[in-house]
Amino acid sequence: MKLRHAMVALLGCTLVAGCTEVAPPSDQAHSDVSAVFSNIAQTKTLDPHIAFSSEGTLYVRQAYDSLLEYEPGGITVQAALASEWKVSADSRTYTLTLRDGATFHDGSPVDAEAVRTSIERIQAINQGPANLARDIASVTAPDTRTVVFTLEQPDVFFPGILPKLPIVSKKAIDTHKTAADPWAKDWFATNEAGAGAYTLVSHTANEIRFKAYDKYWRPFEPGTPTSVTLRTDPDATTAVQLMCQGKVDMIGGIGPDQTDQAAACPGVKTIQQTQYGVRTVFFNQQTSGPPADVRVRKAIALAFDYQSYLDYFKGKAYPANGPLPANAGKLGTPYPDVARDLDQAKRLLAEAGYPDGKFTVSYLGIKGLAWAEFFGTLLQQNLQELGVTLKQTFVPWPQMVSLQSNPETAHDLALLSVNMVTNDPTAMLKSAYVTSAWADKGGSNWGYYSNEKVDDLTASVSTVQDENQRAEIIHEILGEIIADQVAVWLMRPSIYQPVLEKWDVKYEPMDNNVMVRFYFARLKS
């Protein structure tokens, strides 16, 4: 389904569309079904209002629910802790009705005060999902089951934001807060108090374990995992070996070559789904070296062999034409797909004062992922034709985040998969291209790019009711970012991951391509 079709359903939701009531089950009895998921990294914190990376989201989606959610494996918004929602004519006021019977894992009810306090906590902590909540002017609770959001400005995409705002127990906040820590961040960093399908059993440096929540508001159907293990395997080769031994059920975030290796083992299949993202290599805009010159950035981008990189993905990726994926919705007149032009690259370097190259740039990639290492090798070969040396560094994902989050240690080029996290096509721009999203502020703007026009226009898109007018604004924003050559936009990947054949499961395209919500997975009978 295209985004514009999803938005029609979303905006038309009143007391009928997508707003169904589910009777909460009493104590549930179910046979044990276990699932083991391997990821390259583990979340640094268990606090759902701070954890917002792919590995953090993987944890949060199991233990915490939100008012609304995306349909499993899709981009259509549907009811969750809220059973109904209505929007005012000006798209500034959203009224939600909470379902009866939902409880947090500590036994307290999911009521309007818990929702109000959760949003207040997100905004006060101002990390993780806070960027999505910045236009919420107020949250009121007229009664225990009604929550009213008033926005600073109209936002036609607001329902698509609510799945990314986890609701936490007010009781847990009140019990564990201190004068120095009024939002109980210390406690939530290593504990959980959600209303999701799973409760936390244990948390170690390399493994997180969950069990089914017996009073979950939805029933556990036969085949639904009742115990879930998130293990950490920084080297994808290890994860593939474990899957081939039947010790890992699903893997997230590996490339097509390693997926194919796993699929060659008995009992393993592949899952391929649409993804809404762009594999991106950011240029550090704050460097004092040659990439500070836009002509050098353009030369490096023009030197890269995009077709060879696409070929590496064996039909599991598509050409890119800028910072947003072409399937993100109505984006205005498309810009041309990026392509190699070595002659133009040489002319630009000469104009910039580097006719023979003779300089070095640094590249930071993820250790253990073949597709990240292949990019570095290919770019290194391509730049040699310009007389430019590429110094490659590969580190585990947490170290990569740490390096890029400090302008002093950020590399000239750094690889990041930038994906849509809501059905707002500009959500990717808000997370990775506006000034407030600089990496040292917790965002994904790894290039430390700042353009006032981009900031202002990006903030205005969701206020516009007319889809065609929104598309024109988006087209203008993209033109600014492309002209500034903020990054090398490599390609648009598909979700392509290995899974044991015994599972029916979907990955979540709005939560990065390493993400599974295990409540919706089913063990085949």
Image (spheres, rainbow, N blue to C red):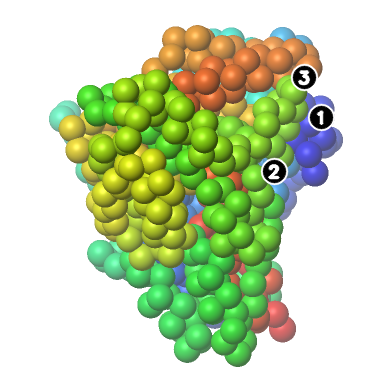
User: Looking at numbered disc 3 in the image, what kind of residue is underneath it?
Assistant: Glu
Q: x%, y% of residue 51?
A: 37, 44
Residue that label 1 marks: 8
Most extreme residue toward the left is 180
Residue that numbered label 3 is attached to: 467
Q: Amino acid at mark 1?
A: Val
- Which amino acid lies under the numbered mark 2 shown in the image of this protein? Ile
> Which residue is at a point 71% across and 15% down the rendered structure image?
472
Sort mark 1 into few (<14), some (14-19) or many (20+) by Cα contacts within 10 Å: few
Residue 517 in percent (x, y) is at: 57, 58
Circle nearer the N terminus (2, 1): 1
Q: Please identify the quarter of the rendering in which residue 184 is found.
A: top left
Q: Measured from the top left, where is residue 151 in percent x and y?
A: 57, 14
- Depth check, front residue: 253 or 257: 257
Residue sitting at x 74%, y 13%: 469
User: Is label 2 in a helix, a strand or a loop?
Assistant: loop
Single out the mark in the foreground, 3 or 1.
3
- Label drawn at residue 75: 2
Whole-number angstrom distance, CA of label 3 to CA of label 1: 11 Å
